[in-house]
Image (spheres, rainbow, N blue to C red):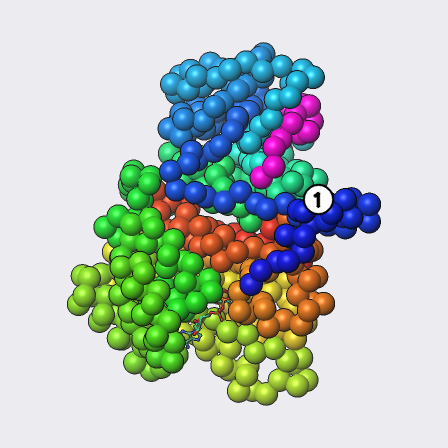
Amino acid sequence: MSDRYLDFVNSSLGQMLAKNLGLPAPLPLDRFVAGEPVVKGAVLLGAASGSDLTTTIAQVLANIQADTYANFDSAVHGAAAAAGLATQAYAPSAEDSQKFKALVFDASGITSSEQLIALHSFFSPVIRKISSSARIIVIGRTPELLDNAKHATAQRALEGFTRAIGKEAKKGSTAQVIYVAPGADAGLESSLRFFISPKSAYVSGQVVRVSNTGIAGETPDWTKPLAGKVALVTGASRGIGEAIAQTLARDGAHVICLDVPQQEADLNKVAGEIGGSVLALDITSAEAPGRIAAHVKNAHGGLDIIVHNAGVTRDKTLANMKDQLWNMVININLSSEERINDELLAQDAIRANGRVICVSSISGIAGNMGQTNYAVSKAGVIGLVNSSVATLLPKGITINAVAPGFIETQMTAAIPFAIREAGRRMNSMSQGGLPVDVAETIAWYASPASNAVNNNIVRVCGQSLIGA
Ligand code: NAD
């Protein structure tokens, strides 16, 4: 549904009123447009002294042909040259009109709390020089994998920096920290590409871990990374599921669109538009896991990606909630996913370098009034991700989840007006996200180059204050 306030506040009258009355002033966010560069504007690359990820980062920036600058006295120029990236020298103190679309900082060399001043030294002089929908990305080492306590403490501290700057930066900007496990440097590219691009428009304040999964990576054609892959999306007839199906198909996948038989007309339409196929069934039915496994094996010889998107809300305060409503929500949102995963694994129906991708919710992280059943189901989805790693990884399969915040769909259109407006505005973007924002995050997980992205729960919530 449309956000009329966002349209109004970007008119000249709306801009004046919002300024004078101190109202939230959301800006339209940059979103991915096929054929445009990964990052549309200058990138400033910095590094704390002793950092060892700079060449890897520079290699990615070279691959995406980023217009890259580094402070004139920075050691970054040498590391960049080693990666074949030409960098321009920049004086941060200059009173110029230079604008940066992205600030990328290699913080891996910060080994003590005293050295955290490097964050201030790099970001403070240039934070006013970011353009709208800018990207702030800090890259460090996974704290819990570091032997040295002071090093681990300093790396953990990066999270506070990105979460705070995400709230300060405004203008539709995002901020994240990406932790790279020692030895997992080669796995950074898919994540850096996603977080520096407009595809991550509504993802902010997140902590992402790139880890040593032992799964061999694939270097895809980045314009069609899912070419040759088969994906199944549940709840694909509308809303977020429809956007996921469209986005995975855009990236080259054959998408099997699944929804309940009552939605078959809409499902046929979605599948028809993207050259996908249809599987009309209720995921809670006893035969669903078997039918799904048989279908993917018989029609496609196996599956590369499954996206568990189908989900429902049935809100009531606990005192008023009948057990049928409780059971229905848990069954659709959680138990059916467990049964389907178990069957697909038992039948060896997911291929190596496969992806299981779940849809949780910030309600599952923070809880929500009137949503005990839903919050239980969506927290359970996070549990499902965490607890499935041990079974899936030996088979070369990753599992991750998105946790959407307020996304403009039929589900959120049904929320009473005042609560809806609060949900929409109480985030760093002062607006709701679009289904495509969730879909792009899922497409990042789905990429065959995301073999090192495992066991992550990334919120797509514009850095919502709920559960922050
Ligand atoms: P939606 O109601 O528009 O779409 C959900 C789809 O799932 C529908 O097409 C429905 O028919 C299908 N579905 C429901 N039960 C099913 C079953 N038993 N078998 C097969 N299909 C079934 O909802 P949406 O807003 O697009 O939400 C998609 C997912 O995102 C859900 O898991 C939801 O919980 C989650 N989510 C949404 C938001 C939001 O703001 N919209 C926020 C957080 C999480």
* Numbered disc total: 1
- State left or right for residue 465 relative to residue 221: right
Q: Is residue 264 above or below residue 270?
A: below
| Depth check, front residue: 64 or 143 | 64
| Depth check, front residue: 133 or 179 | 133
- State left or right for residue 67 relative to residue 467: left
Question: Can the viewer see residue 130 in this picture?
Answer: yes
Question: Can the viewer see residue 428 in this picture?
Answer: no
Q: Residue at x 42, y 63 (%)?
A: 241
Rendering quarter of residue 48: top right
Residue 159 position in % (x across, y down): 62, 41
**Which type of secondary structure does the marked residue at label 1 adopt?**
helix
Badge 1: few (under 14), some or many (20 or more) residues near its Cα, within 10 Å?
few
Farthest residue in the right direction?
Answer: 20
Instruction: Give the quadrant of the N terminus.
Output: bottom right
| Depth check, front residue: 136 or 67 | 67
Rendering quarter of residue 254: bottom left
The residue identified by callout 1 is: 12
Q: Residue at x 40, y 30 (%)?
A: 64
Q: Residue at x 59, y 87 (%)?
A: 322
Q: Residue at x 46, y 62 (%)?
A: 240
Residue 102 position in % (x across, y down): 55, 31
Q: Check residue 330 for magenta coloring.
A: no
- State left or right for residue 310 relative to residue 430: left
Q: Is residue 100 above or below residue 251?
A: above
The amino acid type, in three-letter code, at marker 1 is Ser
Q: Which range of residues does the magenta coloring cover? A: 118-133
Q: Is mark 1 within 8 Å of ligand 1?
A: no
Rendering quarter of residue 416: bottom right
